Amino acid sequence: MKEKVLDELKKVFYPGKTHSVLQEGIIDDVVVEGNKVVVKIKTQEKNQAVIDMLKRSIPIALKKLDGVEDVELVIEKVVDAKDKISDIRYVIATTSGKGGVGKTTVSVNTALALSKFGYKVGLLDADIYGPNVPTMMGIEGVPVTLDPNHKDKILPIEKYGIKVISIGNLVPKDAAVIWRGALIHKAIQQFLEDVSWGKLDFLVVDLPPGTGDAQLTLAQETKVSGGIIVITPQNVAMSDAYKANDFFERLNIPVLGVIENMSYFICPHCGARTDIFDHGGARRFAEDKGLTFLGEIPIDVEVREGADKGKPIVVADPTSPITQAFEDVARNIIERVKELNQEG
C-alpha cells in the first residue's frame, strides 16, 4: 500500500509549481496503519495558503485509493537556516586564498573600523584549525556562556563594542582541533544559528585560507552579502587571489573588492617609504578582474604589537595613519554593500 500512496503523491502538484509534492521533497515519511495513511511533511513554506491547499489536495488524492478511508497530515515547519540570522543585515566573508597575508588582522581591524562609524558589528572566527581572533581581540581564555533568555543558544563575547565568537574560546588554548569536514560544517553552522547575535548591521566572517569546508558551509548556510579578498602585493600572491575570486564566482557570492595588506613600509625615523613586498599587485589584480580596489594597508610594527597584545591598532591608536587606512577601507565596504543592495 505504501508504494501505491507514493505513486499517488507523484500526481499531486505542489501549489503554484509544475512538479509534484514528492519532487518538491517535502514528504518526510508515509505510514500505513490499516485503512489510515499518515503523511509526514517537512517544509519551509511560509505561505499559509499553500499549506492549506496541501491539507486539502493530499487527502482528496489518497482517499481515491482502495482501502484508504482516513488520511492524516503531520506538518512540521522547518526554519530555513538563512532565516535564523535574519537580524543580521550584511554578512561579509573575508578570505585570502593563502595563509600569511594578514587576513585575520584585516578582518579584526575592519570590523572595529565599521563599529567606529556607529554600526552594530559581529566578528565570527571561522578558522577552526587556527583561530587567532581571541588573541588579537584580547579575549583569550574568556569562556562563552549560555544565553539566559535562550538556553539553547550561547552569548558571543563582547569586546571593544563588537560581538565575537571563536572556536578558540570553546577549546583549550593549546589543544589541536583534529576534525574532519563534517565537524567543521557543524561548528560553523552552530556559530551562525546557535549564537545570540541579536541585531547586527555587519557580521564579518574571518575565513581560513583556501577554498574548503568552512567557505562552502558559509555559502550554504546563509546569504553572503559580499566577499573580500585580502592579498599582499607580490606576484606570487596573485595566483591564490585568482583562486579565491573563482571560488566566490562559483558560489554566486558578489565580491565587494580587494584589499592590499602589507602594502608598503614608512620608516618611523626618516619617513622614507619602502615597498617591501612590491606594491600595487592587488590593484592590478582588481583591474584585471573588474573588481573594486578597497584600499591598501601599510606594514607597521604597531599593527603586530597590537595584535599580540590583544589591542588592535584601530583601538590602540585611533588617529594613526594605519587606523585611517582601515577606516578608508571600511567606508569603501559600506559604499559597495549599499551599491550591491541598491541602497541609497
Image (cartoon, helix red, strand yellow):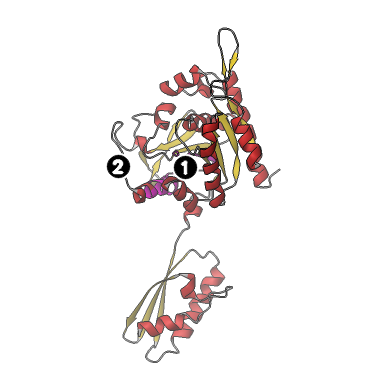
Q: Is residue 342 visible?
A: yes
Residue 23 location (% of width, % of height): 48, 73
Residue 216 higher or lower than 69, as above or below: above
**In this view, the mark in front (1 or 2):** 2
- Compared to residue 193, the image places residue 161 above or below, namely above
Cα distance between the residues tagged 1 and 2: 27 Å
Q: Secondary structure at mark 2?
A: loop
Extreme residue toward the bottom, this view: 66
**Location of mark 2 (residue):** 178
Q: Residue 329's spot in the image, x, y percent?
A: 61, 31
Question: Looking at the picture, does residue 78 appear above or below residue 133?
Answer: below
Instruction: Say whether disc 1 or disc 2 marks the residue closer to the N-terminus.
Output: 2
Q: Is residue 200 magenta?
A: yes
Q: Tell whether 65 sits left or right of 83.
A: left
- Find numbered disc 1 in the image and state the secondary structure of the residue it sits on: loop
Going by the numbered disc 2, the residue's amino acid type is Ile
Quarter of the image holding residue 166? top left
Report x, y in % for residue 121.
53, 36
Q: Nearer the viewer, residue 265 or 60?
A: 265
Q: Is residue 277 magenta?
A: no
Q: Is residue 182 above or below residue 257?
A: below
Question: What label does residue 197 carry, if any?
Answer: 1
Q: Nearer the viewer, residue 180 or 205?
A: 180
Q: Quadrant of the C terminus?
A: top right
Q: State the extent of the magenta-drawn residues as a range.
A: 185-210
In the image, what residue occupies the spot 52% across and 47% down?
Answer: 247
